[in-house]
Image: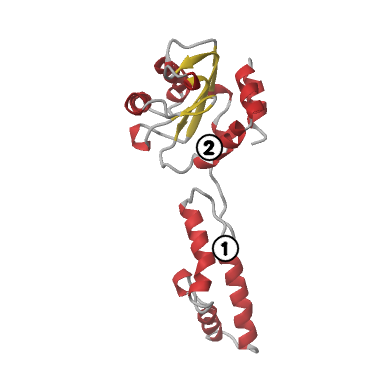
Amino acid sequence: MFIVSPILTDADKAHLLNQVQPFLDGGNGMNALGPSAQDIVDLVKKHSSVLNESALQEDIKRYLTAVRNRPPQDSRPTLPELLFPSRITIREEAADWREAIRIASRPLLDDGSIRQPYVQAMIKAIDDHGPYIVIAPGVAIAHAKPEDGAVRTSMALLALQRSVAFSEALKHQVRLLFIVASPDGDSHLKALTQLSDLLKETKNRMMLENASEKHEIMRLLLPY
């Protein structure tokens, strides 16, 4: 059994291949993943004497297995690294959901993380497909495609004191509107997972909704 992330990055796929490969070739060679233990022993023998070839080969096999099965380093940014005070906006209300998206996006436009077409693409997606971005009571996460104008991986938040309606349905009343942008479709996933963990807790959503200062919001983000 191999346990994997539900969202596989290229690094995750490479790591899974490294784990699976020994079972496919019976532990012999692993040439698809680099030099085998025997290849390395043969190279060493060209330049020095080997007192115990079989013992050296076993040591090299153990070393290669350990290296190849080492989990990849996840260098993707965390939630607090993408969502910081200058990207948080606290307002009493917004005229409608379109204005809410524009207000929430403004910090990302100002710091060059997204371009104006990205904002229009988010609005158009909701016009075309409805309020699919409402993912929890009072919470929406808006996004568009990387090619729509995402310059760098980033997040923003608009916290409203009064809900804005994304449809006539009560379940589409939103007070927390997050904007997510990623130029590669992958680098935002770690922070997005952390945000999802945060929003799973009803008490966290309530505390975010009732926060009147940015530092209160940041205090909630940091543990994740």
- Residue 112 coordinates in the image, percent (x, y): 43, 27
Rendered residue at 55%/82% (across/down): 41
Outermost front residue: 169
Sequence order check, earlier mark of 1 and 2: 1
Amino acid at dot 2: Leu
| Residue 1 marker | 1
Q: Give the quarter of the image for residue 67.
A: bottom right
Q: Is residue 50 visible?
A: no
| Residue 192 marker | 2
Q: Marks 1 and 2: CB-CB under 8 Å? A: no
Q: Nearer the viewer, residue 94 or 169?
A: 169
Q: Residues within 10 Å of mark 1 (few under 14, many from 20)?
A: few
Quadrant placement of the N terminus = bottom right
Vertical position of residue 31 compared to residue 174: above or below: below
Quadrant placement of the C terminus = top right
Amino acid at dot 1: Met
Number of numbered discs on residues: 2
- Residue 9 coordinates in the image, percent (x, y): 47, 51
- Residue 181 coordinates in the image, percent (x, y): 44, 33
Rendered residue at 57%/52% (across/down): 73
Q: Is residue 97 visible?
A: yes
